[in-house]
């Protein structure tokens, strides 16, 4: 069981932000902190890791107090049973893949390092330096190093967001497999709804430094949304006129589509703008893609 109640004042792009969050997380669960940029998600993760000291509150993990403002307890990161995977990998550039993983092992446990190399598919890369690895390979090393400590708490700070969609899907499967295999308690920060539904059993949705909703992904995101309308977020790539109409090219996720728009609709639009796309979708046709059909 992980219990935390944390508070402090933060600076944000829109001014001061009062962070005030409280939650209880069951052992071996997979939880996502979800919300807009600046909501305080990464700060909560860094507080749990001991990288940021809250002004008030407490953190108790499996009965051990990691932080208590009133009792002036603040365990440093190296005394907390955590594994932290950053978006930018944070690997040691002067160490090989194997050495990066072994660095996090509490003792000289060659068999445990070998197991991690095997589980994460890094056997053939164990003598390579981080500079020679792809983004997906670096993230595998970072994940293996985080698990090497056999942590009570695994923290993922948008760990997969910098990867392309194919590699992200593959590593999501690996994260889920490792989470189950080792009975980890995992807390992830993510902006990707697909990733949240795929990995999480529970979501804590933050806005303005507070938890405004919690529950399963279905409870948080799908209740009261069966309205028969599609509402999508897109980015404007191009605007052009053809005869009496305008064609707006949009990027929705990884897909590029053209939509017809009136002069009134495009008056305020510029390339690069973020827009909302709404459409009636009473009876949409769904079919499984080849990639989904082949995915294990």
Image: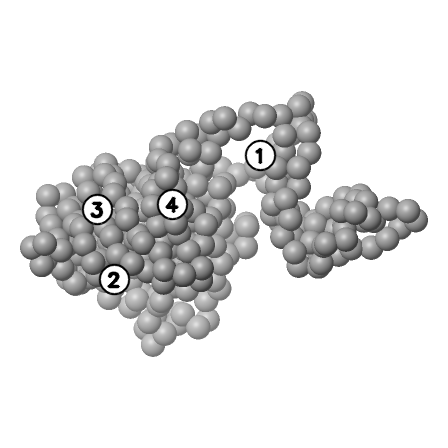
* CA gap, disc 3 and disc 1: 43 Å
Colour mapping: one colour
* CA gap, disc 3 and disc 2: 14 Å
* CA gap, disc 2 and disc 1: 44 Å
Residue 88 or 273: which is nearer the viewer?
A: 273
| Mark sitting earlier along the chain (2/1) | 2
Secondary structure under badge 4?
Answer: strand
Side (left or right) of 114 relative to 157: left
| Labels 2, 1: front one | 2
- Residue drawn 9% across the image and 59% down it: 72
Q: Which residue is mark 3?
A: 5
Badge 4 local density, few (<14 within 10 Å), some, or many (20+)?
many
Side (left or right) of 241 relative to 160: right
* Depicted 208 relative to depicted 91: above or below: above
Q: Which residue is mark 2?
A: 52
Quick one: which residue is furthest to the top in this view? 283
Residue 275 or 249: which is nearer the viewer?
A: 275
Quick one: which residue is furthest to the right in this view? 243
Which x, y percent locates residue 287?
A: 64, 29
């Amino acid at each position: 069981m992980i219990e935390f109640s944390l508070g402090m004042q933060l600076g944000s792009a829109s001014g001061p932000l009062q962070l005030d969050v409280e939650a209880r997380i069951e052992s071996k669960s997979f939880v996502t902190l979800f919300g807009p940029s600046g909501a305080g998600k990464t700060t909560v993760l860094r507080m749990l890791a001991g990288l940021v000291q809250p002004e008030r509150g407490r953190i108790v993990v499996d009965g051990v107090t990691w932080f208590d403002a009133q009792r002036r307890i603040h365990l440093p990161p190296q005394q907390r049973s955590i594994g932290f995977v950053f978006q930018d990998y944070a690997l040691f550039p002067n160490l090989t893949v194997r050495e990066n993983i072994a660095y996090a092992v509490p003792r000289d446990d060659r068999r445990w390092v070998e197991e991690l190399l095997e589980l994460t598919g890094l056997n053939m890369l164990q003598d390579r330096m981080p500079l020679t690895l792809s983004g997906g390979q670096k993230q595998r090393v970072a994940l293996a190093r985080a698990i090497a400590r056999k942590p009570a708490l695994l923290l993922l700070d948008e760990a997969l967001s910098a990867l392309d969609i194919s590699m992200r899907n593959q590593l999501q499967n690996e994260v889920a497999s490792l989470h189950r295999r080792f009975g980890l308690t995992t807390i992830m920060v993510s902006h990707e709804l697909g990733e949240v539904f795929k990995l999480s059993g529970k979501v804590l949705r933050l806005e303005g430094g507070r938890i405004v909703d919690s529950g399963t992904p279905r409870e948080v995101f799908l209740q009261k949304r069966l309205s028969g309308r599609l509402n999508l977020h897109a980015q404007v790539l191009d605007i052009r006129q053809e005869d009496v109409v305008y064609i707006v090219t949009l990027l929705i996720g990884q897909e590029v589509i053209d939509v017809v728009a009136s002069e009134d609709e495009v008056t305020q639009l510029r390339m690069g703008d973020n827009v909302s796309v709404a459409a009636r979708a009473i009876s949409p046709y769904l079919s499984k893609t080849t990639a989904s059909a082949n995915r294990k």
